[in-house]
Image (cartoon, grey):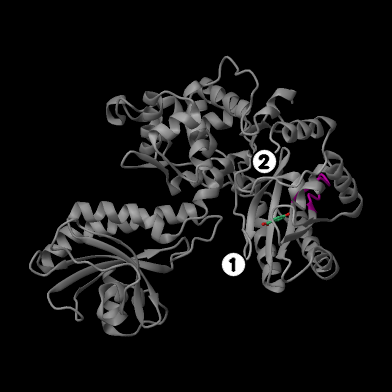
């Protein structure tokens, strides 16, 4: 790697190859800027963060919006859950989360401490799995977060395998970014440790086969880490860490009490990797024809086709499709070879794709920098919010999302109709489940339903109730299902009985409601593939 690349910890400062696709470089810059800003930026914020002209920013955000990767909220651009399909492509091609995630989860349960898996990402570490305990004391990192290697426990283990060039680029980054501003997930560096200190830790970690983080990120946060080796190459595939707080364990006692159990769990992970059969190829990417087949007229004048085509290249990768040749990428995406080649070249330049074995290409962990950290902090109410607002505007009635809380339903998201006479219930409101359409849908989704009212709801797929708890109120609800098909929430439209008859509710409102539930479910499937999405 030429030494100038490290001066910009985020992007390549290498000369841009002549054949690189400029709109793709710009689109990636917009996605990264939004990610670093926590998910939302105004157009002028995007101009400042990317250095692009306003008209370019507008064309890029409207293209990303058309692809479902961002949402335009007034003038602001907001990252949308669908964007997580890019990070999912990397995580499913890597296979480690699928193979080792349950081992990490079991260890977290056994120890009642957070357990994470991280891969090396140049001179940083990036999380690919988190089994997090909910605790108030310290920050917790999410899948996709990037940390500077020297402020972590996994870092020295990866650094023990660094080449001389990699060590040099690490030093140059430290000098160019003394406060770790290039790592938005961590508080600024305060401790002025010498480069030599980390190099000693790396050498020690290489000898010991474990490493500690004694409050290198923030006071109180401690971690112990062990490498998980790929049985085929004997190189580090990822590093498993147990993370705790000094109120429960000092760093020394993490080593004394928890390291043996972490080691046993890692031995199990390595057996899992040794026994894993070749990955079955997953389904081919979908939705590609939309950009490749649709006419300019359908897509709109603002639509930047080369950006859309380029982004679909990332989704060609996945489970059983970790290493793809140019021909395979072109076949999977339906793009012309020359187009696919230029996109791959652009991604290689951006550090999102790397050369793999046998003239193939692989995705790099940096793909997770395209939206994953802020989006993996989302929840079902936040996913549902924009869809409810759209529904409310369409049917001109208020819409809501609720979950079951014992014998009651609790509203977790709402969107008003913007009329004076609409039904107004605030988030957090609880109502008796049995008396509401939301509750009936949720109860009907449960196991062993025998009640005839609920079996009827189950058969129809919706509930329509002239609400017993408020006279003159009519409400229709449908279920929201998770990836596994379990009913996890319900959406409804509530209106005054005088506004629509029961028949009109079924004819006009129900199809809109069903379409809304399908959109929420689609987002939930993408967001919930590798992260746990809180339901409230
Ligand atoms: C984490 O999983 O949050 C973690 C792991 C290792 C560290 C710090 C934090 O050194």
In this view, 61 is above or below 504: above
In this view, 405 is above or below 277: below
Does residue 232 belong to the magenta stretch?
yes
In the image, is 213 to the left or to the right of 201? left
In the image, is 13 to the left or to the right of 482? right
Residue stretch in magenta: 228-238
Q: Residue furthest top?
A: 18
Residue pointed to by mark 1 = 136
Depth check: 246 or 81 in front? Answer: 246
Residue 256, quarter of the rendered image: bottom right
- Callout 2 crowding tier (Cα within 10 Å): few <14, some 14–19, many ≥20: many
Answer whether labels 2 and 1 touch (C-beta < 8 Å).
no
| Residue occupying the point 28% across, 30% down | 298
- Disc 1 CB within 8 Å of nearest ligand 1 atom: no
Depth check: 201 or 393 in front? Answer: 201
**Rendering coords of residue 253 (x, y %):** 83, 68
Q: Check disc 2 and report its element: helix, strand or loop.
A: loop
The quadrant the C terminus occupies is bottom left
| Residue occupying the point 78% across, 64% down | 262
**Badge count:** 2
Q: Quadrant of ligand 1?
A: bottom right
Q: Mark 2 or mark 1: name the one nearer the start of the chain.
A: 1
- Callout 1 crowding tier (Cα within 10 Å): few <14, some 14–19, many ≥20: few
- CA–CA distance in space, label 2 to label 1: 24 Å
In this view, 253 is above or below 393: below
Residue pointed to by mark 2 = 180
Q: Check disc 1 and report its element: helix, strand or loop.
A: loop
């Amino acid at each position: 790697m030429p030494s100038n690349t490290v001066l910009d910890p985020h992007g390549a400062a290498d000369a841009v190859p002549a054949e690189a696709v400029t709109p793709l470089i710009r689109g990636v810059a917009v996605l990264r800027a939004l990610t670093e800003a926590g998910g939302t930026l105004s157009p002028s914020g995007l101009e400042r963060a990317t250095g692009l002209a306003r008209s370019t920013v507008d064309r890029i955000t409207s293209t990303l919006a058309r692809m479902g990767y961002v949402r335009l909220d007034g003038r602001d651009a907001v990252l949308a859950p669908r964007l997580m399909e890019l990070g999912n492509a990397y995580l499913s091609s890597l296979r480690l989360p699928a193979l080792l995630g349950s081992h990490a989860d079991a260890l977290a349960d056994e120890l009642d401490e957070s357990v994470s898996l991280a891969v090396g990402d140049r001179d940083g570490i990036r999380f690919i799995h988190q089994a997090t305990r909910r605790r108030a004391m310290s920050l917790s990192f999410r899948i996709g977060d990037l940390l500077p290697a020297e402020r972590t426990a996994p870092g020295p283990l990866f650094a023990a395998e660094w080449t001389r060039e990699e060590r040099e680029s690490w030093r140059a980054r430290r000098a160019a970014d003394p406060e770790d501003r290039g790592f938005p997930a961590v508080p600024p560096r305060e401790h002025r440790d010498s480069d030599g200190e980390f190099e000693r830790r790396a050498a020690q970690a290489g000898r010991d086969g474990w490493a500690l983080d004694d409050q290198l990120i923030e006071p109180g946060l401690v971690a112990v880490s062990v490498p998980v080796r790929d049985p085929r190459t004997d190189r580090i595939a990822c590093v498993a860490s147990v993370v705790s707080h000094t109120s429960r364990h000092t760093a020394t006692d993490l080593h004394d009490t928890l390291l043996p159990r972490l080691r046993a769990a890692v031995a199990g992970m390595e057996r899992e990797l040794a026994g894993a059969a070749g990955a079955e190829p997953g389904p081919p990417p979908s939705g590609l024809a939309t950009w490749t087949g649709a006419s300019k007229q359908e897509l709109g004048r603002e639509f930047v086709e080369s950006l859309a085509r380029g982004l679909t290249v990332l989704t060609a990768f996945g489970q059983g499709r970790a290493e793809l040749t140019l021909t395979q990428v072109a076949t999977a995406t339906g793009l012309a070879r020359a187009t696919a080649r230029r996109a791959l070249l652009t991604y290689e330049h951006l550090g999102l794709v790397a050369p793999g074995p046998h003239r193939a290409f692989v995705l790099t962990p940096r793909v997770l920098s395209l939206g994953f950290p802020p989006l993996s902090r989302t929840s079902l109410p936040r996913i549902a919010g924009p869809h409810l607002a759209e529904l409310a505007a369409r049917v001109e009635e208020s819409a809501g999302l609720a979950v079951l809380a014992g014998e009651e339903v609790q509203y977790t998201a709402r969107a008003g109709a913007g009329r004076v006479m609409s039904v107004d219930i605030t988030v957090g409101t609880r109502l008796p489940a049995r008396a509401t359409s939301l509750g009936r849908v949720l109860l009907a989704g449960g196991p062993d339903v025998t009640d005839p009212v609920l079996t009827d709801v189950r058969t129809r797929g919706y509930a329509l109730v002239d609400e017993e708890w408020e006279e003159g109120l009519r409400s229709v609800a449908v279920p929201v299902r998770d990836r596994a098909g379990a009913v996890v929430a319900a959406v409804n439209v509530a209106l005054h009985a005088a506004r629509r008859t029961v028949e009109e509710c079924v004819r006009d409102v129900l199809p809109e409601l069903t379409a809304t539930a399908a959109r929420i479910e689609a987002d939930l499937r993408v967001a919930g593939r590798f992260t746990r999405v809180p339901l409230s």
